[in-house]
């Protein structure tokens, strides 16, 4: 069976912020015998003045650069962690298809590099950087295969057959309490410390990255990446699933989600990136 990816993304400042500190990026190569190849990234910056906007910009920009060998390999030095076969593919100019362990290492390295870039910027721009940091949630899709890497409280969701499943864990105070069983899911939105992160880019010299092992998408599945400006406003999951279950295209669904978040108060910047696996065979 032949697949293709239908993709759309939107970001909005919301109703209560002056600046948009969110950022997103996606790149898809559809023409391949092995199916589509896509990179999808959402980042939510934080910090005083322009620090949050700068943080998410540098985080996404670093990921684009570090993961460029997946699409247009230019420099074999950027793939020094890959095995000989993958290096040969890079050297010959072909798109790189990685084994699961190689891809996990590449994503880990890319996120670690983004963390170092933010720390370096903060050191050289201490007055304006303040407590700058950023979340980072990304997915790589190869054919129908998905791998997710994650730091912070932006989220990745899988929508399948009317059911919505959160793939990532929130690296926030209430997220930790939820994992420990000390609060219930419906307490997240009202928790007084819901915006305090214990893990994000730019916080510590070493960043722990959650890598979610590859799994297969099915035709009709949707992958949603979003900042907390969406999930903190549009809940519970059943409500979010209602939007994703629409027969409308991804761009229309993204617009409806942003509108819903704003209608609920728009307390933060809102970023939505939606990917749907389609069959070319109809």
Image (cartoon, grey):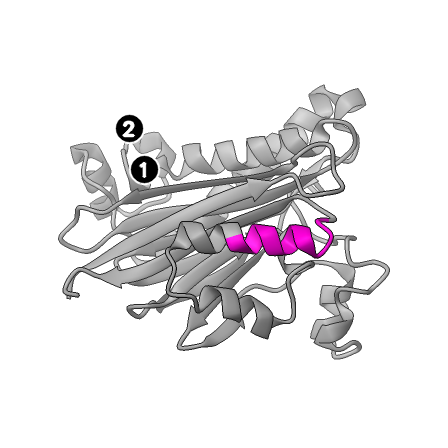
- Find out whether the residues at labels 2 and 1 contact each other: C-beta distance under 8 Å: yes
Q: Position of residue 193 (x, y in %)?
A: 83, 58
Indicate yes or no whether the magenta region holds residue 220.
Answer: no
Local SS, label 2: loop
Q: Is residue 170 left or right of residue 158?
A: right
Q: Is residue 201 above or below residue 126?
A: below
Q: Is residue 251 left or right of residue 257?
A: left
Q: Nearer the viewer, residue 246 or 279?
A: 246
Q: Which mark is residue 74?
A: 2
Q: Is residue 66 left or right of residue 266?
A: left
At x 60% / y 36%, what residue is drawn?
Answer: 56
Magenta segment boundaries in residue numbering: 256-266
Question: Dot 1 surroundings within 10 Å: few (below 14), some, or many (20 or more)?
Answer: many
Find disc 1 in the rendering and name its residue: 69
Task: Tell me the quarter of the image containing the C terminus.
Answer: bottom left
At x 56% / y 36%, what residue is drawn?
Answer: 59
């Amino acid at each position: 069976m032949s697949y293709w990816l239908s993709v759309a993304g939107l970001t909005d400042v919301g109703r209560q912020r002056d600046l948009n500190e969110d950022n997103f990026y996606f790149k898809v190569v559809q023409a391949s015998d092995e199916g589509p190849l896509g990179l999808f990234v959402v980042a939510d910056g934080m910090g005083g003045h322009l620090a949050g906007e700068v943080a998410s910009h540098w985080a996404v920009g670093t990921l684009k650069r570090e993961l460029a060998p997946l699409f247009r390999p230019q420099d074999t030095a950027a793939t020094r962690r890959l095995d000989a076969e993958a290096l040969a593919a890079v050297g010959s100019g072909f798109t790189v298809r990685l084994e699961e362990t190689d891809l996990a290492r590449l994503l880990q390295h890319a996120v670690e590099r983004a963390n170092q870039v933010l720390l370096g910027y903060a050191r050289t721009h201490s007055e304006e950087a303040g407590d700058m940091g950023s979340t980072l949630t990304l997915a790589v899709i190869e054919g129908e295969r998905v791998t997710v890497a994650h730091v912070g409280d932006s989220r990745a969701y899988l929508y399948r057959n009317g059911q919505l499943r959160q793939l990532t864990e929130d690296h926030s105070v209430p997220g930790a309490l939820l994992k420990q069983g000390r609060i219930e899911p419906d307490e997240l939105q009202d928790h007084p410390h819901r915006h305090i992160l214990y893990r994000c880019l730019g916080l510590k010299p070493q960043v722990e990255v959650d890598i979610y092992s590859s799994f297969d998408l099915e035709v009709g599945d949707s992958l949603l990446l979003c900042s907390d400006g969406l999930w903190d406003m549009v809940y519970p999951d059943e409500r979010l699933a209602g939007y994703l279950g629409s027969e409308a295209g991804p761009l229309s669904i993204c617009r409806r989600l942003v509108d819903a978040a704003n209608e609920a108060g728009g307390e933060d910047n809102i970023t939505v990136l939606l990917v749907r696996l389609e069959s070319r065979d109809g």
